[in-house]
Amino acid sequence: MKRRLSDRKGTITLFLCIVLSAAIILESIYIKGAYRRKQEVILASAVSHQTEQILSQFDRQYLDWYGIYALDSIESDHAVFDEMTWKYPDMSFEYELTDEFDSDDLRVSISEYMRLRGLAFEGSGIMDRLGVSISGITGSGSKSSSGIETWLPTFKDYILNRESYSEIWSSIEDECVAQGMEKNLSYFYSFVDEMDEIWKRNASAVMEIGDTSVELSLFDPTCMGDLADAMDGYMDYELPSIVDRLLINEYAAFSFDSRVSGYEGEDGFEEESNIIGIPFSQIHDDENTGDLEYLLTGRDSKIFNNGVSYGMILGTRLILDFCAYLMDESVMSTAYMVAQVISIMIWITSFFTVYIDPTAIQYTIVFFMAFARAVKDASKLISGKSVPLFYHDSVEDVADTTYRDYFRVFLLFIPEDKLLDRMLTVIRRDCGDHLFTGVASKGNLGDDSYEVRRRFELYENRE
């Protein structure tokens, strides 16, 4: 008996229903998966672009002030993320700043910032190794009693108490005339007046060189020995040879304010500014913070920092001026004439029992003259004026120097890590305690998330 066709049609229909149901389910899963993949791609792209947009919000002022790329507080409304995901309300975005700015980041920033600017500021150092013959000043090594201890007390007493010598001074003048030294007296009086002025203004100063303290005193020429020894030990510090260290030093010397509020220029005094010409008054509201001196000492006391800086500049100028005078025949001749008058004064005041060869006094007179010049030079530098590196007719007052120029040398002897830490302290004071160089972003899609970490490429590739 044959089956009817209608029975077969029902079977085919049922089969087709089963197959089509499976196909529809499979197609739905595929479409949903593809849609999900599309959402994930959009999410990843949105998170990445929003992260880059956050990094682009580095503070431009910090770059102008100190040449650093850093983030502090970001006021972001997720504009980029929202614009890219507005069709997908189930997506959300969150982030946090990471990688706090540290001394290693500062080192990289300086290297990058100064490579284009360093050549414009790098120059020769201020000081060279200068030999000083201390024996010529102190009289050490001489068999005769012609050292400064035999005559300096009397000369010092005369300068400080000239009125007490009025009764015997006519005898000294008569003796000078009798020995044909009448013209020497005018040099002597001028010299004494200058020493009296320097004594009243600045008779001494303390120079700090690392762990060593040297007292520079007008009436203690033997301090030149201590100064030379200290400077020799100071200069024996092994200088770094790498270019980056020199760039860091130049950055330190010209990126921070000092006790000098302005410098003498062609159009009068110009306000103290950083490397690219931004006045420091714009960085910290007209307050002179003395950061350059802080970099040298690491101390918070402005009085201490200014004193140490002044002492180091005075000591440097004393060496330079003393060496310049030793090379100047005119100065040496003047010093000898003054020494002759002092020799006669000692001879008469000792009731003709002590005679000192003027040559033994001459070098001490040169020291006094150099000290007087050094005090004047240091005062000029502190007031923003310039002074020649080296006074001498044969070199025509080589290279005018300013206050900051001396720190280019002084800061070379601060260990690099300490110098970077001190600079970072100043930067954090002006820019904020917490600066960041990276961001960690997170995009959420339901229970899933996509994370991105980015950092300024400058710091990311510093290794």
Image (tube, rainbow, N blue to C red):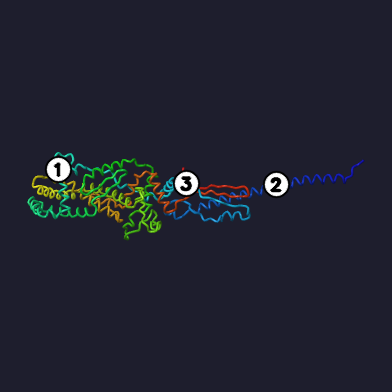
SS label for mark 3: helix
* Inter-mark Cα distance, 2 to 1: 110 Å
Outermost residue on the left side: it is 178
Return the x and y of residue 113 as percentages of the image width and height.
Answer: 42, 50
Callout in the foreground (2, 1): 1
Q: Quadrant of residue 146?
A: top left
- Counting other residues with Cα less than 10 Å from the Cα at mark 2, is it few (<14), some (14-19), or many (20 or more)? few
Kind of residue at disc 3: Tyr
| Among the two numbered marks 2 and 1 on one chain, the one whose residue lies closer to the N terminus | 2
- The disc, 1 or 3, on the residue closer to the chain's N-terminal end is 1
**Residue 202, position as x, y percentages in the image:** 24, 53
Residue that numbered label 3 is attached to: 459
- The residue beneath circle 2 is 29
Q: Which residue is mark 1?
A: 146
Q: Nearer the viewer, residue 92 or 407?
A: 92
Mark 2 belongs to which amino acid?
A: Ile
Q: Are marks 3 and 2 in contact (CB under 8 Å)?
A: no
Q: Secondary structure at mark 2?
A: helix
Q: Is residue 83 left or right of residue 298?
A: right
- Label 2 close to label 1 by CB (< 8 Å): no
